[in-house]
Image (cartoon, grey):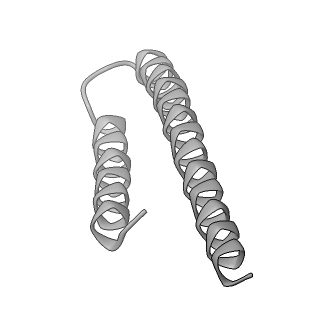
Amino acid sequence: MNDTERTAVFFLASLKIGVGVALLFAPRSGEETREWIADTAEREFKALRRSGRRSMRQLQATVTKGQDILRDGKEALA
């Protein structure tokens, strides 16, 4: 993940936390607010997990490509 992506992730996470705190003061009942927060947190956790899996696949592909390049370079020198 590059700096721009990292900054965007932190910004969005901070924004979501801010929205969550703001909703604690919303005119909903405590139970409704807690249920909404729990549902939102679960949905966001699943999205974050999917994103993490995607990043791991990209990292694995990059490592494999690097290994191939190193192997080819080593063979060319031999």
Residue at image point 38% right, 52% down? 13
Location of residue 38 in the rendering, given as x and y in whole percent from the top left corner: 53, 25
Furthest residue to the bottom?
77
Location of residue 9 in the rendering, given as x and y in whole percent from the top left corner: 36, 55
Residue at image point 57% right, 54% down? 59
Furthest residue to the right?
78
Residue at image point 59% right, 38% down? 53
Q: Locate residue 50 relative to residue 40 in the image: left or right.
A: right
The correct choice, above or below, for 3 with respect to 43 in the image is below
Q: Locate residue 40 relative to residue 11 in the image: left or right.
A: right
Of the pair 2 and 33, the residue shown nearer to us: 2
Of the pair 24 and 36, the residue shown nearer to us: 36
Q: Locate residue 25 relative to residue 55 in the image: left or right.
A: left
The correct choice, above or below, for 12 with respect to 68 in the image is above
- Quarter of the picture holding the N terminus: bottom left
- Quarter of the picture holding the C terminus: bottom right
Residue at image point 55% right, 57% down? 62
Location of residue 7 in the rendering, given as x and y in whole percent from the top left corner: 31, 67
